[in-house]
Structure formats: C-alpha cells, structure tokens
Image (spheres, rainbow, N blue to C red):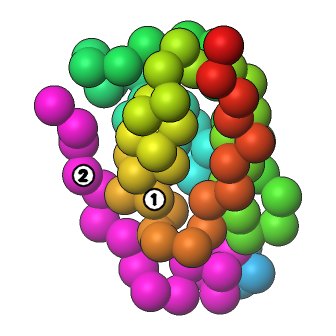
C-alpha cells in the first residue's frame, strides 16, 4: 500500500517561496518506509534545490523504479533524482 500525497505542478516554485525542503524530505522518507512491498532501509533521502535525491542501495532492479515512483507521488514528477544502486 502506498499513501498518495497531493502534489502540485509548481513544486519548484513552492520551494523557492519558502516551502520547507525538510518537510518534503520527511514526507518522502515516510512514504518509503510505509511501502511494505519493498525494503527501502538503505536509502538516504536528501534535497538539492527543489529536487529530492535518493541515494543508497536496493536489493532488486525493480525497486529503484518503485522508490522513484513513491518519491514522485510526494513531490511531483520530474523533481526526483535517483542515485540508487542495486546490490
């Protein structure tokens, strides 16, 4: 089960106007930990400007795409950069 969060088209604009990057990071971390179908315990979530960056390791190839999908559900499509590696 994935919790879907309401996103806005102008996420980048919101970040530039004082939107809390810490809250975006925390929301992505929460959504990843709530996804029980995949183990995301080795993923580090950070922010770089208006972007959320996912770094770390996953166990299976499909889990990279799943992590990006979950993060995009929170911050919006196009605002997630993946630096994930599969072990």
Asked if 47 appears above or below 10 in the picture, the reply is above
Q: Locate residue 79, reporting x and y percent.
A: 61, 68
Instruction: Kindly tell me whether residue 19 is visible in this rendering.
Output: no
Q: Residue at x 57, y 73 (%)?
A: 78
- Image spot of residue 27 (x, y percent): 48, 42
Task: State the residue position of label 2.
Answer: 4
Image point (73%, 69%), residue name: 50
Does the magenta-highlighted stretch encompass residue 4? Answer: yes
Residue annotated with mark 1: 72
Question: Foreground: 26 or 58?
Answer: 58
Q: Is any part of residue 70 visible from this angle?
A: yes
Q: Quadrant of residue 37?
A: top left
**Residue toward you, 18 or 4:** 4
Task: Find the distance from the CA under tag 2 to the CA under tag 1.
Answer: 10 Å
49 left or right, relative to 19: right
Q: Which residues are magenta?
A: 1-15
Magenta segment main secondary structure: loop
Residue 42 lies, in percent from the top left, at 64, 14
Q: Residue at x 36, y 19 (%)?
A: 38
């Amino acid at each position: 089960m994935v919790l879907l969060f309401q996103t806005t088209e102008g996420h980048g604009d919101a970040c530039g106007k004082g939107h809390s990057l810490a809250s975006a990071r925390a929301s992505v971390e929460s959504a990843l930990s709530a996804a029980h179908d995949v183990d995301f315990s080795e993923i580090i979530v950070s922010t770089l400007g208006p972007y959320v960056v996912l770094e770390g390791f996953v166990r299976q190839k499909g889990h990279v795409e799943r992590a990006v999908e979950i993060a995009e559900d929170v911050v919006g499509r196009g605002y997630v950069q993946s630096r994930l590696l599969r072990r």
